[in-house]
Amino acid sequence: DAGVIQSPRHEVTEMGQEVTLRCKPISGHDYLFWYRQTMMRGLELLIYFNNNVPIDDSGMPEDRFSAKMPNASFSTLKIQPSEPRDSAVYFCASSLTRLQETQYFGPGTRLLVL
Amino acid sequence: DAKTTQPTSMDCAEGRAANLPCNHSTISGNEYVYWYRQIHSQGPQYIIHGLKNNETNEMASLIITEDRKSSTLILPHATLRDTAVYYCIVRGSARQLTFGSGTQLTVLP
């Protein structure tokens, strides 16, 4: 299995531009999580899905952030418009249904907003 | 989920056992203790988890005290590749993982 796949691995953009981050979870996993990591705030959950349905988006910072999961094998996290404070590493993770199941993390997307 | 307390950093000599402590004094009966690690510039990696019994797998051992208020992750023979930030996480019914600051373990040659 290829594991959780994220793209792009690195993104540099200018303030005000739209940014789209992509994630392919491990096949058969029905939970998908988006986390963000910064030096100041550490690793924090943004949103998670179960069977393609958003369950908890309380960690999404503001309306500029949106996430979708159109099917079981693909999710996007969009920032529009982007701001310098959005610069961070964004991780996607997936897991199976069983409550104490392990979460598997992707390699992350390193975003820099100038 | 209960809060955890870990030392900010630790050093360990290569080939020796690394013992990483974690305090979780407010843990409740149905909460598990999880350990993840994050090697620089990579995504977090699952290591091990347990409820109240000691656990061992190919990566590490987890020792949980009888009162469950603290635990220790043991890497039996640390290598340079074990240098990473180690996160102790207490997780109950919540689906998400709540990461603290973790312990930066540096394995020295």
Image (cartoon, helix red, strand yellow):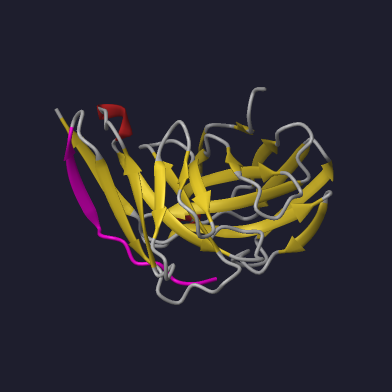
Q: Is residue B78 above or below residue A71?
A: above
Question: Split into 4 quadrants, where in the image is the C terminus of chain B?
Answer: top left
Q: Is residue A12 above or below residue B103?
A: above
Q: Residue at x 19, y 30 (%)?
A: B14
Q: Is residue B25 above or below residue A107?
A: below
Total marks in image: 0
Report the residue that reaches farthest toward the bottom: B26
Q: Residue at x 57, y 52 (%)?
A: A35
Q: Residue at x 66, y 48 (%)?
A: A101
Q: Position of residue A102 (x, y in %)?
A: 61, 45
| The one of A105 and B17 positioned closer to us in this rendering | B17
| The one of B38 and A68 positioned closer to us in this rendering | B38
Q: Residue at x 61, y 45 (%)?
A: A103
| The one of B74 and B103 positioned closer to us in this rendering | B74
Instruction: Please indicate whether residue A65 sits to the left or right of residue A39 in the image.
Output: right
Question: Is residue A113 visible to us here?
Answer: no
Residue A76 located within the stretch drawn in magenta: no
Instruction: Please indicate whether residue B74 sits to the left or right of residue B32 in the image.
Output: left
Q: For the stretch drawn in magenta, what is the main secondary structure?
A: loop
Question: Split into 4 quadrants, where in the image is the N terminus of chain B?
Answer: bottom right
Instruction: Please indicate whether residue A3 sits to the left or right of residue A44 in the image.
Output: right
Question: Is residue A18 visible to us here?
Answer: yes
Find residue A38 and report its image quarter: bottom left
Q: Position of residue A4 (x, y in %)?
A: 64, 33
Find residue A80 and report its image quarter: bottom right
| The one of A26 and A71 positioned closer to us in this rendering | A26
The residue range painted magenta reads: B1-13
Q: Position of residue A58 (x, y in %)?
A: 66, 69
Residue B2 located within the stretch drawn in magenta: yes
Report the residue that reaches farthest toward the top: A1
Q: Position of residue B85 (x, y in %)?
A: 34, 46
